[in-house]
Image: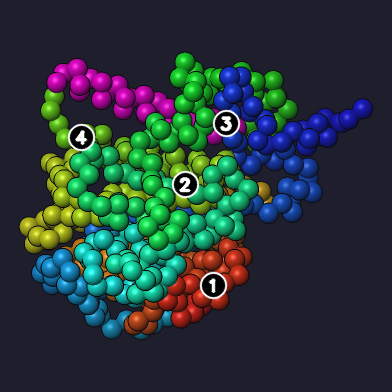
Amino acid sequence: MSSHKDRISSISRRSFLACAGGASLGLPWLESFANAKDSKTKTPAQRLAFFYLPNGITRRGFFPGEVDRPLPKFAGQNNVWRFEGKAVPSGSHPLTLTPTLAPLHKMRKKVSLITGMDRTFQHGTDSHAQCASCFLTSVAPYEVENSAYPLTRTLDHVAADSIGQTTPYSTLELSCNDHKNNIESIYFDNMSWYGTGHVAPSMRNPRKVYDRLFGTQLHARFRNITDLALGNARQLQKRLSTTDRRKFEEYFESVRTIETRMDRIDKMKSELVAANIKRPAEHLPRNEYIHLMGDLLVMALQNGLTNVGSLMVGPERWTTATNWEGILDKPYSHHGMTHAIGAHLEQLLKLDRFHVSAFARLLERMDRIEEANGTTLLDNTIFTLGAGMGDGTTHQYNDLPLVVAGGGAGKLKLGNHIHCKRGTPLANLWLTQLQALGISRKKYADSTGVIPEIQA
């Protein structure tokens, strides 16, 4: 007769919630599904994620030592200006959290600010067009023949070729662009690419993302998937340890919270339509929208649906005015504000800080999610916040704003400010991350080496 412990060990994590009606819900790592030996030796999956900021940032709020920097003037759409910056020695320095970076205070030991990294602008397209689209590109400028973009397979897919082959989705692409007016080409609104000219289109509707991740699209009659799942789960829940029961309940509560928020958003939309109130298509509360999409990304990483994901918090150069409820007092065009920074400095600083706080919120949540071997989801993830421009007003491609968080399963050394010497390609950071993920690669795009200061 098999023991209670053997019966638990024989239950697979993924089959635990195989539910009626064909719906299923993945679970985070639970110690009850592994024997004592496995819980100490099991290696958690490594993840890679990106949190992308459009239209650059406001330098004086983000970069240490630039609070008194003169406000720059608009440099023109195709005039990529070079910012020389203040004389900061290259190497590792203590981490200084500026007003924009202040929301990262709780996570300061698990993040590093990376400055001084450059990209090369390939003339032939608008300066914004190569920002998100080429941010993760695996090719050096001018190397793709007959293309105005130095663009081919991006880092997320390169990494997923190695660490994304055992998950239902090799990559997950999300975007917080819910505008209906398609005023720009796909190059302004996508950061993930299978190859030159072959975009990996991002998902933008939280309800559709949820349906795709949890398989409920064909089961609309079951509005609450957690009620459906719990019908089968209750029979097995009593076999979990006390710690796993708590983790199980917390996980289900996070799913319920997302469902409740989406239902509230749907109800709000219906009420607006019924009242015939004419508002911009992006009437979804902006902070709610970004938080919700971020939570969906974290849940996908947590329960093994994907190991690689990206989230764009907005599109490049979109001039449509956006409602930033709870952040700004009226609709603004983010892109337009960056071209008139003197009149909109306060609003831009608020917006930048909100974006960083949304990133920090995800980091804090990931650091509370326990995984095998005494680690957390954040410990096993390399999560990068960044932008394809060093400044939205000057359109500069040098000294990009970058924050690397997580730990790469102990492969990254964090908690510092790493300033790279002038001319260091952004691709050096991507090469460093690939190697931290255990992916053997000597060169990436126009890389000249790795960043030794961040390697553990």
How far apart are labels 4 and 1 at the CA level?
45 Å
Quadrant that contains the C terminus: bottom right
Asked which quadrant contains residue 243, the reply is top right
The answer to whether 305 is drawn above or below residue 437 in the figure is: above
First along the sequence among labels 3 and 2: 3
Q: Is residue 187 left or right of residue 278?
A: right
Asked which quadrant contains residue 329, the reply is top left
> What residue occupies the far front of the structure in this picture?
146
Q: Identify the residue under disc 2.
A: 172
How far apart are labels 1 and 3 at the CA level?
36 Å
Residue 455 marker? 1
How far apart are labels 4 and 2 at the CA level?
25 Å
First along the sequence among labels 1 and 2: 2
Q: What stretch is highlighted in magenta?
A: 248-276
Which one is closest to the eye, mark 1 or mark 3?
Answer: 3
Which one is closest to the eye, mark 3 or mark 2?
Answer: 2
Q: Which amino acid does label 2 sit on?
A: Leu
> What residue occupies the far right of the structure in this picture?
1
Q: Where is residue 258 in the image (x, y as percent from the top left)?
A: 42, 31
